[in-house]
Every structure is written in structure tokens, then in C-alpha cells.
């Protein structure tokens, strides 16, 4: 049976120190609930001495959480330790986490203390913490730049005074896998009664080695890994929880350890944290990034269709994500295109596939990514060259409360003109389009960005419009942002009509006759 490695999550404490990641008490409680569902062993809820809000956050998390241990951080001074113990009073399984620096550079320039003074402070801090809380963790700050024999002394004093966990952190992200593995082996091998405590590893990612160092520390004897969701934290961040957990799970041949993490909750935790903090998950982030299970290259898509294991070492379902995505872009091949069309319910002949592929490549050269709605339009126009779409030929808006819009659309040889009022220029223009087409749409999402530099930048609008319960995307571009938005709405409308034609479904309405104008 594999040995257990405990997961100490410090998203609410060290992770929150990431610039822009501050959370209020309510947000901490939301995240703590998700961490409990995720199955972490310890939730470090905050640094109570820092502020009243921090104290309240730890106290409320302590009350709310059922089975994970709840930890609070404190410097090795009595007022910090006592304040942390107060915040943990309602915790069912409290952990008081106290620390002091042990590297020569920190002791000299930050603390102004000698080694003997630091050893004395460790003894007093751990002893006081143990008298107040059942479980105590001691951290030797900047351990990876500390003298190894002095680290053995520090660990020995901490254990003698009641520490249950000894953490040897790479506070500045300086070490390498070989060095940290040797550090843990040396301290564990030389500190008396080392087998009576749990050794923990806390790493920062300044050199991009946090996960690798955490795994090396486990090989060196650590049985607790301190990490954060999405790897957030000070500077370049901390050990990424999802990466270290999935590395052990995926490479059990190299790391024969297990955790209690419910991996299917990883994506939920990642997305919740992103929503709470506003920190966007990088597309190429391992395990939880948008592209982690996306495949655009034609040869990759061909392999995925034959056997997913060709290009995926873990399944998206194992981390709580949907199916793998065959992203359609200019690098995609015919196999990926044909498979996506098949998933959408279209059976194409070889000739149709070849014809569609030519149209698809032409479109992919203009767009970074081709969506299903785009494919439906291409298929509709390919199968019925008489399929006509609406085209915006004139737009005039005025006023603001209410706004008025005049819209002129063409469809084939027919021309339609309507006016309408609304809450703003875009709303009034969309209402005029509804009058022309007889099709009502609800604008669900709207965003715009500059597609080109300069004062006369081309604005690119993206919308999601709901027609009869069907969400349809649309894009438009213009130097006028209102016009770009209206073009995007018309583009979504045309895709909806294409969808109806491919499914042989009636549209929600019919255009007014040209004569009625």
C-alpha cells in the first residue's frame, strides 16, 4: 500500500499574499468550503496577528470547517502565538504554525540574532504554542539557504519542545530538486526522534521549480506538502496543488505515494479561486488551464481520435473537466474537422469534407479559433448555395435616454429598414433588427477589444445571444464600437438561421416584406 502524503493548503494565507488575491471573510469561507470538498488535510486560514479581518477570517473558517485541520500562522513571539490560539478556539482540529528564520543572511540582516538566540526563541515559541494548542507546526524560514548542521539543531529543539510537524521551506525559491532531497535526508537522518514527527515541504516558484522541489522533498522523506490552488502566492507563487497531486497520481511508478485529494474537484477549486480573486488562469497552465486538454495540431487530433492515450497522460474527467477538446484552428487537419462535424450530427461525404476543409482553412486564416456555430454556417452555405444571410448596410444612432437607432439590412436582393428606441444605441439597434426579422434575441454577453493599435483602432466585438434557448456567438469589427457590436449581433443571428436550416427547424419569425418599409 502506498504511503500517505498530507496536503497542507495555504491558499487562504500564503496564496492570498499574491498581489491582487486578497479575499474578504465571506470569500475565504467560500474557498474553505471548496477546499474541504477537495479533500485537503490542513487549511491554513490566515495570519491572525496581521489584522482584525485576518483574525476574523481564521475564526470563521475554524467554526465552519468540519474535518480538515485548520492552521493559523504566528511568528515566534508570544503575542502572535496567543492571538493565533484565540482565533483557533472553535476549530475541531487546530494547528498552530509558528516560524522563525534560520539562514545566516536572515538572522543577521532581518532578525539581528545569533544562532544561540534563534535556538532559544524556537524552544520558547514551540513550548508556548504546545501549551495552547494540541498540534504545533514549526517552520525554519529560508531553510534551503541555512547551514545543514544548524538545521539539525533547530529541528531537534523544535521536536524536544513538542513540535508535531517540522517544515523546511524554500522561502525564496532558490533550491533545486537534488539539493532539497539531500537537505531532508540529512535533517531526518541526524535529528534525534525525527521519526516521531512529520516533515513538511513548502516551496516557492521563483525559478519554476516549486513542484519539482516538492516531489524531491517527498522522495527525501517529507510526508506533508504545503501548496496552493493554481500555485498562487508571493512573487512567482507557491507549489501548485493540482500539479503536485496529479504528478504523484499519474507517475505512481516514480512517486509511490497517495493523497486524500478528490481530484474530480480540482477544476471547481481552480475556477472558484479565479472568480474570487480575479486572477485569470493562464491558458497553458498544467492540469487546469483552458488548453490543458485541447488539441489543435492535425497529427495530435488524428492520434486522439484513434486513442486518447496517444497525447493525454491523464483524463480531463479525472480533474473534474468535460471531454477533451479538438480545437479547430489553422493547424487542424481533416480528421479533426470531420470528427467535430460528426460530433455535431453531420455526416459528410469525402467530397463534402474536402470542400468544407477548403472553406474552413480560409476562415481559420482570419480567425484564431473556429467554433461550432462557424462550422454550421459553412456547412449550410456549402450544402445550399442559395442560403442568404442578413448584412448590415446602414446604422444611425442618436440620443441616450432613450436612444434611437435606424437600421438598414439586406438579405439577397431584399432591403429592410426599421427604427426603434432602447436603453442605449446597441439595445435600440438590436430592437430594430428584431422588428425586421421577427426573431427575438437576448444579449447574454458582450465584450469589445481593440484589434489594431492607434487612435483609429479597429474594435472587435464578441457577443453571445440567446435565440429560442440556443446560445449563439457572434463577432464584428469596426472603428465604431457600436457598429462593431451590432455587426456581432447580426453575425450571431445569421449563425442561428444557419443552425435552423441544418436541423430543418423553423426559425422563430420571418422577415418583414420589403414593401412594408
Image (spheres, helix red, strand yellow):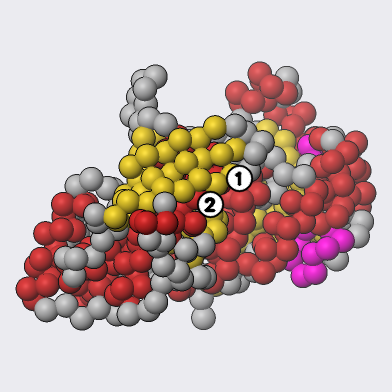
**Residue 192 occupies quadrant:** bottom right
Residue placed under numbered mark 1 in the picture: 422
The stretch drawn in magenta includes residue 160: no
131 left or right of 343?
A: right
Magenta-colored span: 62-76
Label 2 vs 1, first from the N-terminus: 1
Query: Residue 446, percent across and down?
Result: 51, 47
**Residue 390 occupies quadrant:** bottom left
Q: What SS does tag 2 mark?
A: helix
Residue 184 lies, with reference to residue 340, above or below; the image says above
Residue 482 lies, with reference to residue 177, above or below; the image says above
Q: Residue drawn at (88%, 38%), measured in percent from left and top?
A: 52
18 left or right of 243?
A: right
Callout 2 environment at 10 Å: few (<14), some (14 to 19), or many (20+)?
many
Q: Residue drawn at (65%, 39%), measured in percent from left and top?
A: 402
Answer yes or no: do the residues labelled 2 and 1 have beta carbons within 8 Å? yes
Toward the left, the furthest residue is 351
What whole-number distance in Å separates the C-alpha atoms at marks 2 and 1? 7 Å
Residue 115 lies, with reference to residue 208, above or below; the image says above
Query: Residue 393, percent across and down?
Result: 33, 42
* Nearer to the camera, 316 or 77: 316
Q: Residue drawn at (55%, 59%), measured in percent from left and top?
A: 442
Q: Residue drawn at (58%, 50%), measured in percent from left and top?
A: 274
Residue placed under numbered mark 2 in the picture: 431
Amino acid at each position: 500500500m502506498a504511503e500517505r502524503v498530507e496536503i497542507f493548503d495555504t491558499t487562504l494565507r500564503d496564496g492570498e499574499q499574491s498581489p491582487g488575491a486578497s479575499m474578504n471573510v465571506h470569500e475565504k469561507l467560500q474557498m474553505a468550503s471548496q477546499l474541504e470538498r477537495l479533500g485537503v488535510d490542513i487549511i491554513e486560514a490566515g495570519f491572525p496577528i496581521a489584522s482584525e479581518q485576518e483574525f476574523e477570517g481564521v475564526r470563521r473558517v475554524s467554526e465552519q470547517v468540519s474535518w480538515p485541520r485548520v492552521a493559523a500562522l504566528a511568528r515566534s513571539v508570544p503575542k502572535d502565538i496567543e492571538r493565533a490560539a484565540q482565533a483557533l478556539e472553535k476549530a475541531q482540529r487546530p494547528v498552530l504554525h509558528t516560524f522563525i528564520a534560520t539562514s545566516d543572511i536572515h538572522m543577521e540582516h532581518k532578525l539581528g540574532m545569533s544562532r544561540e538566540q534563534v535556538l532559544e526563541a524556537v524552544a520558547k515559541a514551540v513550548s508556548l504554542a504546545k501549551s495552547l494548542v494540541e498540534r504545533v507546526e514549526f517552520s525554519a524560514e529560508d531553510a534551503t539557504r541555512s547551514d545543514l548542521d544548524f538545521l539539525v539543531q533547530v529541528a531537534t529543539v523544535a521536536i524536544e519542545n513538542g513540535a508535531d510537524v517540522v517544515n523546511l521551506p524554500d522561502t525564496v525559491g532558490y533550491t533545486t530538486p537534488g539539493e532539497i532531497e539531500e537537505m531532508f535526508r540529512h535533517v531526518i537522518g541526524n535529528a534525534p526522534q525525527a521519526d516521531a514527527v512529520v516533515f513538511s515541504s513548502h516551496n516557492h516558484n521563483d525559478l519554476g521549480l516549486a513542484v519539482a522541489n516538492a516531489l524531491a522533498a517527498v522522495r527525501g522523506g517529507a510526508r506533508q506538502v504545503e501548496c496552493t490552488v493554481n500555485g498562487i502566492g508571493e512573487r512567482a507563487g507557491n507549489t501548485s496543488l493540482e500539479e503536485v497531486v496529479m504528478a504523484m497520481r499519474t507517475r505512481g511508478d516514480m512517486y509511490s505515494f497517495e493523497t486524500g485529494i478528490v481530484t474530480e474537484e480540482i477544476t471547481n477549486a481552480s475556477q472558484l479561486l479565479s472568480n474570487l480573486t480575479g486572477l485569470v488562469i493562464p491558458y497553458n497552465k498544467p492540469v487546469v488551464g483552458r488548453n490543458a486538454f485541447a488539441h489543435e495540431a492535425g497529427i495530435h487530433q488524428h492520434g486522439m481520435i484513434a486513442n486518447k492515450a496517444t497525447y493525454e497522460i491523464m483524463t480531463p474527467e479525472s480533474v473534474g473537466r468535460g471531454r477533451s477538446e479538438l480545437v479547430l484552428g489553422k493547424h487542424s487537419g481533416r480528421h479533426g474537422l470531420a470528427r467535430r462535424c460528426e460530433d455535431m450530427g453531420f455526416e459528410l461525404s469525402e467530397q463534402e469534407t474536402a470542400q468544407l476543409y477548403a472553406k474552413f482553412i480560409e476562415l481559420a486564416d482570419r480567425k484564431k479559433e473556429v467554433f461550432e456555430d462557424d462550422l454550421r454556417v459553412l456547412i449550410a452555405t456549402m450544402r445550399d448555395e442559395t442560403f442568404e444571410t442578413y448584412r448590415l448596410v446602414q446604422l444611425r444612432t442618436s440620443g441616450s435616454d432613450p436612444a434611437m437607432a435606424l437600421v438598414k439590412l439586406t438579405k439577397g436582393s431584399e432591403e429592410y429598414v426599421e427604427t426603434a428606441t432602447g436603453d442605449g444605441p446597441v439595445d435600440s439597434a438590436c430592437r430594430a433588427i428584431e422588428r425586421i426579422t421577427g426573431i427575438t434575441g437576448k444579449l447574454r454577453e458582450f465584450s469589445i477589444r481593440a484589434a489594431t493599435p492607434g487612435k483609429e483602432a479597429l474594435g472587435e466585438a464578441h457577443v453571445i445571444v440567446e435565440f429560442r434557448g440556443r446560445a449563439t456567438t457572434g463577432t464584428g469589427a469596426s472603428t465604431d464600437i457600436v457598429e462593431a457590436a451590432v455587426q456581432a449581433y447580426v453575425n450571431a443571428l445569421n449563425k442561428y438561421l444557419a443552425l435552423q436550416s441544418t436541423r430543418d427547424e423553423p426559425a422563430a419569425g420571418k422577415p418583414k416584406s420589403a414593401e412594408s418599409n
